[in-house]
Amino acid sequence: GEGLHGFTLFWSPMEGEPTKENIDQLLASENNNFISRIKTSDREVDYLKSEAARLRTSGNTRAVLFQHGGTILENAQGIFGWDEIFVRCITDPDLVHYFLAALTELHLETLKRTLDAAGDVVDIVQFGDDLGMQGAPLMDPDMYREMFLPYHKKMFSFVRENYPNVHVMLHCDGAVFDLLPDMIDAGMQIFNPLQSDCAGMDPARIKRLYGDKITLWGAGCDTHGTLVRGTLTQIREDIRRRIQVLAPGGGFVFNQIHNVMGEIPPQNVLAMIDAAHEFGQYPIQMDAPLEELETRYAEYWEEPWRVLQEEGVQ
């Protein structure tokens, strides 16, 4: 749709038959876009220091989020190729580990510089790695555990051990239900965006299983269907159902599932915000206990707009 710039990867620097020497050369260069996106300049550190100083004296009462990124899989896809990285994980796992270990050290260097500068005023550091598609994870859970999880764990542990006031957030799109236990064990404390329209991402089930372990940030409104095509009444009802599942007991940050695109009418966005305020007041009003809501809404999440229409919500 309109209102979005999309990019397709046409070239990867490690195409062909890369070697460890090729990786060393890539990571040692200071003059490429890949390294410049990972490393933090002195100018950026100075800016963080000045902003941290301002926040310390401003009386700020809101959570401060630092968007670090720290992608492991996505950077590997950019360097080796979108699909090729998964082939390499099977045919040459040592080379992939060599790259990921070196990449992680660069991420840790950036984390240390930025959090040393502003970590005392930062509440959340956001990592990002999209590990799922609409219908399944991008890889078998065993491949994730063997190839990528150790590096997520190393970064998350670094933050939690050295900056205990900072909470670890992972932005991870897609159908990743099978990976959630490993992410939590690695040290993830906040999960975003909880794409409830993806296979297996039932917010009631995830709240029941993991709501006492992590904060859920997202799944507040269906952006694929209801927010785009729904009536104001349908939007309000969609949000009511989601809040009564996700908000009880705390540990929930309201956010629509994904980006608000250009074709979404402004009045629909305003209706979403109004409904969040209306139904997000504690104590949360629930139609039934969570276990019963999980059963009631089991067929709802993947196509909520269609279900609302079939139920006669106009």
Image (tube, rainbow, N blue to C red):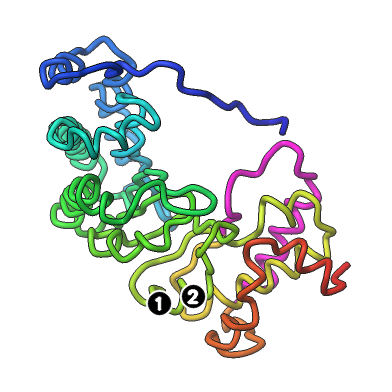
Q: What element does badge 1 sit on? A: helix
Give the alpha-carbon distance from disc 2 to disc 1, as whole Å. 6 Å
* View extreme (front): residue: 91
Residue 70 in view of the camera:
no
**The one of 215 and 198 positioned closer to us in this rendering:** 198
Instruction: Please name the residue shown 27% across and 19% down the image.
Output: 14
Residue linked to disc 1: 209
| Number of numbered discs | 2
Circles 2, 1 touching at the beta carbon (< 8 Å): yes
Q: Is residue 273 magenta?
A: yes
Q: Is residue 73 left or right of residue 305?
A: left
Q: Give x and y (percent) for residue 11.
A: 40, 16
* Residue type pointed to by label 2: Arg
Instruction: Please name the residue shown 16% across and 34% down the image.
Output: 109
Quadrant of the drawing holding the C terminus: bottom right
Within 10 Å of disc 2 (Cα), the crowding (few <14, some 14-19, many 20+) is many
Residue linked to disc 2: 205
Instruction: Please name the residue shown 69% across and 61% down the image.
Output: 303
**The one of 197 and 46 positioned closer to us in this rendering:** 197
Instruction: Please name the residue shown 17% across and 38% down the image.
Output: 108
Span shown in magenta: 255-281
Q: Give x and y (percent) for residue 82.
A: 40, 30
* Residue type pointed to by label 1: Leu
Residue 29 in view of the camera:
yes
Within 10 Å of disc 1 (Cα), the crowding (few <14, some 14-19, many 20+) is few
305 in relation to 249, above or below: above
Q: What element does badge 2 sit on? A: helix
**The one of 198 and 18 positioned closer to us in this rendering:** 18
81 in relation to 177, above or below: above
Q: Give x and y (percent) for residue 121.
A: 30, 49
